[in-house]
Structure formats: C-alpha cells, structure tokens
Amino acid sequence: MSDNDAAILQENNQENEPEVTMESLMGQLLESEGVTIDIPTAGEIRDGIIASLTDNQILVSIGAKSEGIISGKEFDAIPKEILATFEVGKAIPVYVITPEDHEGNLILSFARAVEEQSWIEAEELLKSGDSISSIVAGYNKGGLIVPLSTIRGFIPASQLGLSRRFNISGATPEEKFKEFVGEEVEVCVIEVDRQRQRLILSERAASTETRDMIRDKILEDLDEGSVRKGRVTSIADFGAFVNIGGADGLIHLSEMSWDRIDHPNELLKVGEEVEVKVISVDKDRRRIGLSLRALQPDPWNRYVADLKIGQLVEGEITRLTNFGAFAKLNLPGDLEGLVHISELSDKRIDHPKEILKSGDVVTLRILKIEDKDHRIGLSLRRVDSPAYADMDWKNLLESYNLEQGIEGETIGEIVGEIAPDEPLDDVDDTTPEEAEEAIEELSTPTDEIPSTVLEEAVEPLPSEIHAEEPAIVEDETIDEIESVEVVDAIEEAEAVEEAIEVEEVEEVEETEELPSEPESESAE
C-alpha cells in the first residue's frame, strides 16, 4: 500500500466517525455508569413526576437529562380544581412542546397532554363503537355540548334520543335545550376530526329505546288531570293528534273549544306547540285523551244562570236528526239544545222534517238543564201547556217589572195595548139632567100611542105563550117611574121598551098564523 492510499483511507475513516458533542459525551459517560437517557421528541406524551410546585410553574421529571417546565399560558390552562390536587411526587401526563428551547429548557404542557389523550380515547371509541356516559354541559342553536374528558363533543338535535327529542319545545335554543343542561346522557362517538377539532356524538346510536318503549313509559307516568306541552303532529276531521314526550294523544273536536267549531284547523295547525290537559289514559289500548278547552274558563254556568225549567225561549233550528231537532237559542253564549222527537208534537211523527226545517225560528220550552254534560232539553209541543200557565204569567209580570195585586191595573196597561191616560170615545158620559130628558122621551102618553098598538099590546096571548113568557105589569105609571132614582129609572124604561117590542113581534107572528087554522080544520 502506497502512502497515498494510506492517507485516503485515513481521511475516509475520519469522515465516517460521528461528531463528538457534549450530549454524546454525557451519554457515553452515563452508559459507562449504567444509566440510560431517553431523549424526548416534540409532540410526544410522557408520564412525569412533579418535582417542584410553585405559584407560577411546575417542574416535572420525565427521565430526560433535565426536568421539564410547565409555566406561562400552559400553567394557566390547568383548571384550578385540578391544580389544587397537584403535589410533589404526583404522577401526571405531559406533552412535549419543545425538547430544548433557546435557553436549553424542556417545555411541557399538562393541558395538551390531557387533550391529546382525550382525542386518542375518542378515536378508540369510534373504532370500537362503545358508549360512554357524560353530563350535558351546554347547548347552541343546533344541539347539546357534552364533554369527553377535556375535549368538547357536540350532539346534533337529530342525534338526540327519542324521548329527549319528543320533549323539545319552543322557538329559541334556550327554550329547546336549556332544560337538558346538567342531565346525564349516554353517547357514542360517530365522527372524529383532530385537525378541525371536531368531535360528533350521538345519543340515538347509544340508545336502545323504541317508540313502543317510550309510549309505554309515557303511559305509566301520565296522570289524568295533568297538564303537558306537546306538538301537533296531524289533523283530522274529528280532532288533532298531539305528541307529548313521545306518545301521541287525541284532542277530539268536542274538546277543542267551548264554542262550536266545524273543523280543528280553525284553531290548530301542524307543528304548532300547545298546552293540553290529560283527560283520559287507556293503558290497555294505549290511548291518551287530551283537551284544550279544559284549560279555558267554562262559560256554561254563567250562560245558564238565569235559565229556569219551564221557561219559554226562542230558538233557530240548526240540524234535524232521526231522534230530534237541534236548536240554537237566541240567548248569549251560543247555547244549543235538543228537541227530542217525542217533544215535537202531540201526534206521532216519523221524522222531525214533518214539522220543522233548518232555519225555522220557533218558541220552545226548557224541560231540563244538565250542567255536567252541558245539555239543554227543549219542547215544542208543551209551549201552550196549561201546566205552565202560572209560570208564564209570573214571567210576564217579571219581564215588565210589575208586581201582582197592584190595585187599579188592567191587562191592557200591563201589555201596553191601551194607554190608561187616553180618553175613550165609546164611553157615554151621561149627566143626571140628560138622563131625565131621556126618561121624558120614553114616557109618551098612552093617548098618543095608536089604538091598534094598545089593543094588540093588551090583547090576551095564547095559553101556550102565556105559560112561557111572563105577563106585562099594566098598573105601572109614568109618575111611579119618575119617582125612582135616575139610574133605576133608566133601567126600568129600557125594560118596558123591550117588553113592548117583544109583544109586538109575537102578535105579528100570531096574526100571520091565524088564517091557516080554518084551512087545516076543513082539511080534517
């Protein structure tokens, strides 16, 4: 080997030898003493032991050549309740931020270590599909915030469990989700994105609830008379279905309002939130009866307070059925009553249309008032019944604010047909002087009366006529009549005049019959 070759070989050996540094020399020294050093790398998570603890920094030994430091914002990031548990000698996880800064310090972080462990745990849960239990810490406009160790996970509203989702009500996030804060929730991890700091959880995936299970649970917890909030899910002609906590209940058309309505859509619409009262629970058939009007004041008692059995009312016929006719009463409150077919007429009828038609306005009599069922029984055939005559008379007096037994009142004054202060043209106001003149006119002397009339007046009547009619007293004179009081004289004169006229008529009839008697005898 030449000298040149030896020089080249020596240079190559020098190039292949590692650079000698202080760290390498310290490592060689520790290795010779049997001590090994694990040099940390950035981003690595290590378990360390607290070596020193002050008010603004923590020294942690992680097996490196020097102790690491937790200070500044990393020290402030440690929750106070956790920091209060730290003490010298306690093992804690740390995250290596910088193995050696410009001052040669090893910079560590406790908060980042815990966060990194949480992400690792979340990824493991995503792979396994296992569920964990946590507490709802908050909410935003889209769902609930749930912590997973030190990172915050999000449960969208669509991923909530059925029972919780059915209980959501209100228009704002606070109204929808505030009541869930602090409640325990079982969730599964369904998405992990460490770069975007995105952790999505699902309560629905962790829940084994079914609709039937929820309905059974609701039925067990429901009590008649309780008040619940729900949401209208569908509307039919006969009522509306409302979901309360996961179970559907029915508000029948008759339970919508105290006033008459024709269809539920007059009051409700699908998706509307309502407050309802539970009026029936059928656990066997899984049916829930709800009511809107039960939460409203009942006007029935106020409307029927002044009504009485037997009272006459006016009503308009609204519907005809096989069993009777419904009539809307002309009274405050939109009251409606039933005229049963047996109360329409005294005669037998097969259908109310034989007597009435819709729109007829008739007078009816109240037969019964059922407060519990809000029913009024009416009658058409008993409107003129004598059994209610006294009541009708009393009601008439009360309607005119009159009292019975007021002296001097007449029917005309009560009903208003005759004004009591108006003079009557047909009343003859005869004075005593006028009465005497009338008597003198009636007292005509007998010599002025034709003789034929006098003879006919005094001629004896046939025996059969005398037996039936009383004889006229001939002994009375004008002087005797004039001696009587004025009123008696008028009555006496009228009686005499009437008697004379009667005898004249009878005499004429007798004279017409006399010529026929001989003819009848000759015929015999």
Image (spheres, rainbow, N blue to C red):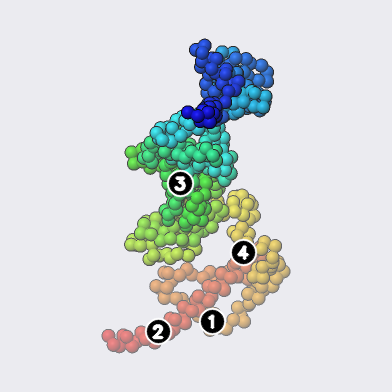
Name the front one of labels 2 and 4: 4
Q: Quadrant of residue 129?
A: top left
Label 4 crowd (10 A; few <14 / some 14-19 / many >=20):
few
* Residue on which disc 1 sits: 453
**Which comes before the other along the chain, label 3 or label 2?**
3
- At 44% from the left and 83% from the top, the residue drawn is 511
- At 51% from the left and 15% from the top, the residue drawn is 31
Discs 2, 4 touching: Cβ within 8 Å: no
Given the current orientation, which residue lies at the most extreme top position?
33
Element carrying mark 1: helix
431 or 271, nearer to the observer: 271
Label annotation for residue 242: 3
Above or below: residue 51 compared with residue 181: above
* Residue on which disc 2 sits: 514
Q: Quadrant of residue 341?
A: bottom left
- At 59% from the left and 28% from the top, the residue drawn is 97
**Which comes before the other along the chain, label 2 or label 4?**
4
Label 2 crowd (10 A; few <14 / some 14-19 / many >=20):
few
Above or below: residue 249 compared with residue 217: below
Label 3 crowd (10 A; few <14 / some 14-19 / many >=20):
many
Given the current orientation, which residue lies at the most extreme front position?
2
Q: CA distance from mark 1 to mark 3?
A: 106 Å
66 or 125, nearer to the observer: 66
* Residue on which disc 4 sits: 417
Disc 1 marks a residue whose amino acid type is Val
Quadrant, the C terminus? bottom left
Name the front one of labels 4 and 1: 4
Disc 3 marks a residue whose amino acid type is Val
